[in-house]
Image (cartoon, grey):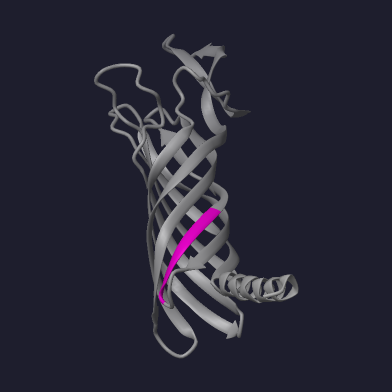
Amino acid sequence: MSTKNKIYIFSIILALYSSNINAQVNIGIDAGTTSNKLNYKTNNILLGQKSGYITNINVEYALNKWLSLEGSTGAIQKNYSISNKSNISQQINNTYLQFPISIKHCINVIRRLNASVSLGVYYAYWISSNTEGVAPNVFDLSNNKDGTELIKLQSIKYPYQFDSSKDNRNEFGYVVKAGFNYKIISRVEISIRAHYYQSITDQQKKMQKPQNGRYNQTFAVTAGLTYHF
């Protein structure tokens, strides 16, 4: 066989292989809102859930017609609030760069509508934290009629400075997703999904024994768009 024919056959095989790969890859984006709860056992303060945002770029590799491997990269907020009986309250806004990977299973509901369930794990890096709320001003004191010293409250807002000796900025956990995909044209579909992220690593490094762990528990709802290559 001549070199020219070998190159021709190799080119055909490569083109078919590339076409097969492209046909199995889907790329999409989604965005939505989060509601996070910090699981932390304490008797001194009240912890509350707080909303935030989530954005993702998603890449799917189809293993077969109904099963695919899904990887994502995006930003997610895992916020919460703290308060006590002295009317002191703060909102903690934490932003993470997150990388989930999961197995996605699809089931056809009607002609253009599919339902999906995904199970997987994720890694997240804590990139920023901001605090705002009300705190006591120890430099502005006064006394009431019976001589009791009063501490006035003031509004606060500041970025948190991470402490490498105590803050664990690497978070690992598991993720569950469920939703619906609707094909609007041959290669494009829209989706709505519910997400649940549960951290299994403490927000703080081990500093004492025993130590109450701080674990993020995050719910999210997103809407998205996917293109099938």
Left or right: 173 as drawn, with respect to 31:
left
For residue 229, say whether it is visible.
Answer: no
Left or right: 94 as drawn, with respect to 173:
right
User: Can you give x and y, in whole percent of width and height, for residue 6 in the image?
Assistant: 68, 72
Left or right: 151 as drawn, with respect to 188:
left
Question: Residue at left 57%, top 51%?
Answer: 74
Q: Which of 172 and 22 lies nearest the eye of the viewer?
A: 22
**Number of callouts:** 0
Question: Residue at left 51%, top 20%?
Answer: 163
Q: Which residues are magenta?
A: 66-72
Q: What residue occupies the far top of the structure in this picture? A: 147
Question: Residue at left 46%, top 57%?
Answer: 220
Q: Which of 165 and 136 lies nearest the eye of the viewer?
A: 165
User: Can you give x and y, in whole percent of width and height, for residue 199 in the image?
Assistant: 37, 42
Queried whether the magenta region covers residue 61, the answer comes back as: no
* Quarter-of-image position of residue 85: top left
User: Can you give x and y, in whole percent of width and height, for residue 29 in the image?
Assistant: 60, 63
* Quarter-of-image position of residue 161: top right
Q: Quadrant of the C terminus?
A: bottom right
Left or right: 107 as drawn, with respect to 72:
left
For residue 149, say whether it is visible.
Answer: yes
Q: What residue occupies the far left of the structure in this picture? A: 210
Q: What residue occupies the far bottom of the structure in this picture? A: 111
Question: Residue at left 57%, top 77%?
Answer: 189
User: Can you give x and y, in whole percent of width and height, for residue 196 in the image?
Assistant: 39, 55
Q: What residue occupies the far right of the structure in this picture? A: 4
Q: Which of 159 and 62 lies nearest the eye of the viewer?
A: 62
Q: Quadrant of the N terminus?
A: bottom right
Q: Which of 154 and 130 lies nearest the eye of the viewer?
A: 130
Above or below for 210 versus 203? above
Above or below for 164 versus 22? above
Q: Main secondary structure of the magenta part?
A: strand
